[in-house]
Image (cartoon, rainbow, N blue to C red):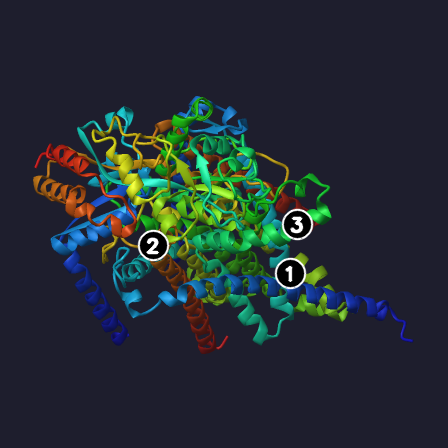
Amino acid sequence: MKRSLRRCCSTLAVVAAMTLPAAAATQLTGAGSSFDYPFFSKAFYVYNQKNPDVTVNYQSIGSGGGIQQFTARNVDFGATDVPMNADELSRTHAAVLQIPVTLGGAAIAYNLPDVTATIRLTRQVIADIYLGKILKWNDPQIARLNHGVKLPDMPIVVVHRSDGSGTSYIFTDFLSHVSSAWKSKVGTGKSVVWPAPSAIGAKGNEGVAGQVRSTPGAIGYVELAYVIENHMPAALIQNKEGRWVACTTETVAAAAATKPDVSATSFSIVDTAGVNSYPISGYSWIVVYRDNSDRGRAKLLYNVLSWLAGPQGQDNAKSVDYVPLPRNVQSAAEATLRQMQR
Amino acid sequence: MNRDLSTRGLGRRRAMGSLGTGLALFCATLAAAALLAILGYVVVQGIGAINWSFLTQLPHPVGVPGGGVGNGILGSLIIIGTATLMAVPIGLLTGIYLALFGRGPVPEALRFLSDVLSGVPSIAIGLFAYAVLVAPLKHFSAFSASFGFMMLMLPLLVRTSEQAIRSVPQTVREGALALGMSNFRATVSIVLPTAMPAIITALLLAIARVTGETAPLLFTAFGSQFWESNPGNPMAELSLQVFTYAISPYPSWQSQAWGGALLLIVAVFVLSLGARLFLRRAMQGSGT
Amino acid sequence: MSPADRGFAAVVYLGSSLFAILIIGLFVELVLGSWPSIVKFGPAFIFSSSWDPINSKFGALPMIYGTVVTSLIAIILASFIGIMAAVFLSDFAPRWLGQPLSFLIELLAAVPSVVYGLWGLFVLSPFVRTAVGPALQKVFGWTPLFSGPIYGVGLLTAGIILALMIVPTVTAISRDVIAAIPRDLREASMALGTTKWETAIRVVLPAARIGIFGACILALGRALGETIAVTMVIGNRPEISASLFAPSYTLASVIANEFTEATTNIYISALIELGLILFFVSMIVNGLARVMIWSVRGSERT
């Protein structure tokens, strides 16, 4: 009995010793977008190595969850793929600053086992596929764009996100811009009613990627990072200028560069002008309170966030397949953050 | 030819019996084979990720090699341990109440409520734990996760402990009472130990069930990248980490997810085995 | 009553009351959370088929359908396989076979839901799409149940995954219940000249049926509430169709999919109302079970 008691005590002591260093540093908490999670985990890790007195605990519970927790003041900052609208802002009963923090693009992945060339699709064709107007891969509208490619007589299985998602928002925003039929029938949102007769919902980017990978004839929109890491074939899309572009960090950055004055009220960068722009791109945002009664904490928060949105933080984006903010957007974010009371 | 009643049609009945036994064996093997298929898949995907640093280190972001789920393992132990400590007394006491004071509208209502609880989705229970323990305190905590897990474990414990106590023969209880024991002593010293094996099975099943749960943790324990042992703070949890990594795009994280899943299964395996052995030794010791 | 007895009774009452308070509290929280949605949509919520977050139109019927069908498939498969396996493990298996097999089956309960989901997506659904589905369609394709395109994901695959997840519960508890049936019953039956199999099926199982039924109800409860594994293999389409191959949606899946992204009050409230409906579905299922048990017990007394 005594021996096991002693063993218990020593185990507890070891555990306490392990957790003490963590307790000495200040821990800031953030919650929200799962899209941001890989980028944040890299960036905050690097920040902690340079500033051991601050740790940032960010958890991906979804943009909506992030806004909820931020409004309830359970976390220091929130991260969301779609900026908070007037309704959500009014519920916080306080001044909120919103800054863009990273960029992403939705690639159109597909599964055609016997086709080796990269498929080309126009924006209108993508909209028609998702509207359910084009039902087979060898439809003349698709064949017309892909000379010399033998398209199979297979039904198109349309895959979308079943969970509410910022990627869905960007994609439906794009569809609303390029197709008036989509705009009136469905609209833009994180969760919509998908009209295609063969539409299947999958959970998360991984779910859509997995569904597309295991279903011949499937097509789906997936975050850039997934397509890169899983080496999935993704379609070339004809952008507004008529050029055929693939979804890469460069083309998404080019789309962002066409709108230097992005703000929380005017943030859409889908279907932009610019020869290299990828039409399905979007920002992701961080929300933080302007006024904070705990001045010390506010200063630490300001340091972390301005580092994150600045050149040093953004440098970490490429290594995890994320797109860094354009220089002018970085400066604008800095300026917004400087409003923080600290 | 032997034509008396007991052997009429014996050949055909024996054949039916063999057929039936074969079917039963097939079913048992099917269930076990399904597990082996899933387990095999997890092992193949995850065994490569398991090494000492995986078990002891904090998670690293993508691109930084190494890293592990050490804090998740600690968190799971703390959260599930606390949940068990809370669930066992409440579950056992309710089971005893139902077994001893069994008839009547109030016990029936309680049994009904218990069954209904077992059907509530774990995410709804997570929301309840959030409403009760996180929102008012404005603070995520491992304790709220334990609370949610406790509610998931209770129906199984209540139902099985009632069942187990009921199936102890009346003669045993009456014998104890006849010897002058109070109801209390009779139940605790005589009836409960006899019912223990079934209760332990249910407890193991309940622990196994919550070990793999993720949904209730999203709004309660919140998760963490760091070491944490204070149940009042956000804490990492292994199944939550597995979930987060599994749905990410990076092969390095995905293989760590499978490694974590393998750990979870092995942990339950070891726990079940250990409990069974302990039980056998305890039963042998008491001479039953 | 001795003081020990009084104290004991008090503690027992305390524990049970705490249990009751927890469940009632859960119910109250669900009602409070879904009140805005109840007020706005009324009973139409249950019978409406549209789920349109953008236009704030919410209806639960397709999800109720999906939940009921997948759970039905799961409990039918799992109770048959589970009870048969339990009979084998308790009455027929020699010790060297029975113990490891029991153990393996119980371990199925330890597999995390997300692993079931991923295995289901990458292994089971292609298997259903290429092998099981076409075979079923060849034999039963004339019924609406097995008609239509086979995607691999859908009601059938979700039902199978759920069955796998609840088989351990059915098997383990049934096995314990069957083993607890006194030996004299079996011996008396065999003395009358029945075979071992007949004894197991016609004497032991009926004697154990209440406990086994309880195991099935517990298992069904788990099937009704499972989220992550189901959402990865069901196709997530809020539509009612007759075919088991069609994609569908369950109450729990919707909540898991959309809760963390829901930002408007009415949206969140509608999702919580789905949780409340699930609570009621569970209540109805258990109520029916109870009625069946009472009728069985009643006939036993004669």
Q: Residue A176: which numbered mark, if any? A: none
Find residue A7 and report its horizontal and vertical position in percent.
25, 72
Is residue C182 left or right of B163 when viewed as pictured?
Answer: right
Which of B243 and A276 lies nearest the eye of the viewer?
A276
Find residue C51 and report its horizontal and vertical position in percent.
48, 30
In terms of image quadrants, where is residue B266?
bottom left
Which of B157 and B94 lies nearest the eye of the viewer?
B157
Question: What amino acid does circle 2 point to?
Answer: Gln
- The reply to whether callout 3 and callout 1 are in contact (CB within 8 Å) is no
* Up-down relation of residue A1 to residue B145 (above or below): below
Q: Are marks 2 and 1 on the same chain?
A: no
Residue furthest front as drawn: A148
**Of helix, strand and loop, which one carries label 3?**
helix
> On the image, numbered disc 1 is attached to which residue?
C84
Question: What amino acid does circle 3 point to?
Answer: Pro
Is residue C228 left or right of A332 when viewed as pictured?
Answer: right
Image quadrant in which the C terminus of chain A is located:
top left
Q: Which chain is indicated by disc 1? A: C
Q: Residue B241: which numbered mark, if any? A: 2
> On the image, numbered disc 3 is attached to which residue?
C134
Q: Which chain is indicated by disc 3? A: C
Question: What amino acid does circle 1 point to?
Answer: Met
Find residue B255 and report its horizontal and vertical position in percent.
38, 60
